[in-house]
Image (cartoon, coloured by chain):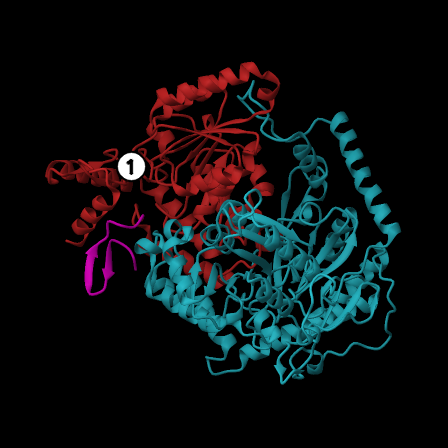
Amino acid sequence: MALDKTEYSMSAAEKMSNGAVGRNKNGVRVDRLDGHVHQNGSVKKEKRRPFIESFEKIPLLTAATTFIGFHLILLMGYITSIIFTPKVAREKNRKGYVPLYDRFESFYSRYVYRRLRDCWNIPICSCPGSEVTLKDRVTHDCGWTFEYTGTRSTALNLGSYNYLGFAQAEGSCSEDSAVKIKELGCATASPRIEFGTQKIHQELEALTAKFVGMEDAITFGMGFATNALNLPSIVSKGCLVVSDEKNHASLILGLRLSGATIDVFKHNNMESLRQVLHSAVIKGQPRSHRPWKKILIVVEGVYSMEGSIVRLPEILELKRQYKAYLYVDEAHSIGAIGRNGRGVVDYFGVDPKEVDILMGTYTKSFGSAGGYIAGSKAFIDHMRVNSHANCYATSMSSSCAQQIISSMKIIMGMDGTNEGKKRINQLARNSRYFRRRLNQMGIITIGNNDSPVVPMMVYMHSKIASVVRRLKTNNIAVVGVGFPATPLMEGRIRFCLSAAHTKEQLDNALVHVEEAADFLGLRYSRKRRSKEPVHYSDSESEVE
Amino acid sequence: MVGKYIQIGERNCLNLGTNNYLGMIENPEIEKSALECLSHYGVGSCGPRGFYGTTEVHLDLEDKLAEYMKCEEAVVYSYGFSTIASAIPAYAKRSDVIFVDEMVNFAIQKGLDASRSQINYFKHNDMEDLERLLMEQADLDRKNPKKAKRTRRFLVAEGIYMNTGLMAPLPKLLELREKYKLRFFLDEAISFGTIGKTGHGLTEHFNIDPSEIDMISGSLENSIGSIGGFCVGSHFIIEHQRLSGLGYCFSASAPPLLMAAAITALDIMQRDPSIFQTLRDNSTFIHSQLSSQLPSDLRVHGHPESVIKHIRLANPSGDKVADEQLLNEIVDK
């Protein structure tokens, strides 16, 4: 993606960086992202990593049918609401009060969402590993109420965030956690700054800092709260935050609570980011035109709804140029991508200290709960005193902390085995294999080839529910996402691969997905489909 | 373990600093049920409630809480702070009005910020001030009846205030609620499991039917000795949070072992109501002893039965820095 040369002049050295757009057919962009290291005026040839992302556009006919379909659903809901009385409880003893809910909101949740309600909130009765036991339930009245049938069914789990397969009830991690519960109890009932800091928290912080490659780290009991309660201590009124349009709700909440000015740039679009930064630096604060106190770029490592990976080297280049700070939320990328599982900085081979603030959660790849923020020692010392979560929210449970310590040691190879390496390779292999097989079927998947999240586009709301139900009868548990979590026309099924999945399990799933694709018409892709068999071998993984 | 005694450096001190009101943290039954759950479910739940993060344990806990508080439904969050901070913005939006006590805790303040509504603070536990604000709002409504029909009005109070140790005058608040048609949210983070003959909170203490209050929110981190929070109320109100509570929908569900610990704690609370009498006796004893034995320049604040006691300077000099220095010296001694 060449930077626009008319806006400012680039030095000869800069012109050689960031490659040019390769072929641009059907939304596939093959870029060559190389770290530009200059030696005597020439670019040192570094190992080139192909950055293959695909965002194939929706076919026009599908867009039209999705649009019409959605409005038909609304119309049917409206007619139903007039003819039949709703079974939902009405408010008691509140006559004369202003209605609590918005009319459209309650209509949507009762007459549109309710009909598809059985696809979400499915209760489980076992550990969410590669296979999960679901509690069966039926609805006899189109989704108003559910009844448990008393039976259970085991399904392949393609919905839980279990990237490295640490969601296990047996194994060294669980045993260590059990020991810690007996020693330290379940909770501390106190915020960190009062009496909630135990030795295990300090051990965890030191280990996390070592894992991500930063000077120091601070941990919190909940991943969502890590973003929402710490961003107000980092930025305040008079600061500018440039955030990606697809950022997570916790980031948006944290930024809103901070009072800073927020500017949004198009998802993963470096030209849009450059324009926003450029105009911010030139114009300054809204009325006074004074320079901003600081500019913070907030992005995520792997976007869980799109499956895309952030373009880190390009953002670092822009950050250096415009003297902005960078905050990367690695909730889905820590442990899941990178040669050693250390996240986006490891994936791109960048020095972690170039990113100012690295944030992540322990829920996905470590099979525990909680979040962390890592950065320089001075920054973390500031957070220890000023973070809202540190001062007012309870500290992490010791069992969760121990689970993280055990699993992190395995990933780092500190337990003396190569179990960690095996898991990272397995995950990379699974992600690439699954995505290539889906593409071969003609199904549109979006996002980066290396991301462990594979969203399969189905577009229509009714198809989201049909695919989820159909795959459930074939004992495959998947997750469907639609409006309002995604744009209106872009309903999708999101597969989350795991290192615990074997090739046989994936092949079985793919057989059923292909059946569903034929039955429901999901082969939307207009790209040429290769007939060569997709290999499942080490040479396919990103580890070279 | 941070229980009755706490080890700081070399010294073993009596613990008067953590929120372990019923001593559940050292209870062996709770430890046993947590270990059992760990051997079945592992540690983390690996997903939000909507995407295979709902286990049987979560559903059990919600049913038990609803039954315990005599309400229709309960919703459980994975962190105490996020509970009230997500619950308030789920109902109150930009065009609404919220009346809240000025001494509410930090989590409620964050919830109010996130809701973007117009906030009216009334003086701490001062019902006349609240009535004055309500009458002003009623005047505004009379001038603009069309807008008044769309503006929702909320009242937020805490059972026992973390910042002062005093109890909210619940009967008077309910009277005002009825008169001015407000929606009442009560945060019982501290009063749940500590006040009332059998620990049901402020509603039991004042002998009021819990359904009079629109939503009661509580914490599993204080009396129950686990991690998390919950909201109870009628089905009509609580169901809404399952789709609009940010901390519920966009966050991983709580680790099942902590939920199992909470269920066991609730069972203990129901089985053995004498612990509440012991707690109440301890609180009133400390209050009376502190009131009589403290030196004259210190005073104890807080309701006699409250588990939170504040010791303050009897005559604050007005200079925050000097006062803090003096208090630090006292603490170090």
Callout 1: few (<14), some (14-19), or many (20+) C-alpha neighbours within 10 Å? Answer: many
Residue A125 percent across, percent down from the top left: 56, 56
User: Residue at point 68% right, 74% down?
Assistant: A17
Residue A122 belongs to magenta span: no
**Residues shaded magenta:** B1-19
- Along the horizontal axis of the image, is B212 left or right of A488? left
- Identify which residue, A284 or A56, lies in the foreground: A284
- Along the horizontal axis of the image, is A330 left or right of A234? right
User: Is residue A399 shown to the viewer in this render?
Assistant: no
Q: Which chain is cyan?
A: A
Quarter of the image where one finds residue A521? bottom right
- Identify which residue, A19 or B301, lies in the foreground: A19
Tell me if residue B269 comes above or below residue A100 in the rendering: below
Letter of the chain that mark 1 sits on in the rendering: B
- Per the image, the residue denoted by label 1 is B165
Residue B14 belongs to magenta span: yes
Q: Which chain is red?
A: B
User: Residue at point 58% right, 28% down?
Assistant: A100
Tell me if residue A161 comes above or below residue A65 in the rendering: below
Residue A276 percent across, percent down from the top left: 65, 54
- Along the horizontal axis of the image, is A59 left or right of B67? right
Mark 1 residue type:
Gly
